[in-house]
Amino acid sequence: MKVSIEISMYPLKEDYRQPIREFIDTLEKQDTFTTIRNSMSTTLIGNYQAIMPVLNQAMESSLKDLPESVFVIKLSGGCL
């Protein structure tokens, strides 16, 4: 099933840019789905089964490094 996932990461620390860049870089290394950077969020487009394991691992890794982070995710079927 094809999906679009919009995700925003909010590291709750003064130097917030670097953790966001690292998170997005991890997602962009994948070639099984499309990653589109925006000013306030990142959009992932592709197969649900391909995106979710990568997204899960990337969020878990980020939360281990910086537990004081918030992720906001919007998931929709199809390609929006």
Image (spheres, rainbow, N blue to C red):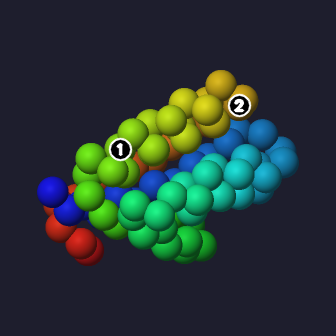
Residue type at tag 1:
Met
Which labelled disc corresponds to residue 66?
2
Mark pair 1, 2: CA separation: 21 Å
- Locate residue 8, reporting x and y percent: 52, 54
Asked whether residue 43 is in view, the answer is: no
Residue visible at 71% across and 31% down in the picture: 66
Nearest the viewer among 9 and 32 is: 32
Q: How many marks?
A: 2
Q: Amino acid at mark 2?
A: Leu
Position of residue 6 in the picture relative to residue 67 (left or right): left
Rendered view: 60 above or below 74: above
> Mark 2 falls on what kind of element?
loop
Left or right: 73 in relation to 63: left
> Looking at the image, which residue is at 51% across and 58% down?
30
Quarter of the C terminus within the rendering: bottom left
Q: Quadrant of residue 43?
A: bottom left
Query: Which disc, if any, is residue 52?
Result: 1
Mark 1–mark 2 CB contact (< 8 Å): no
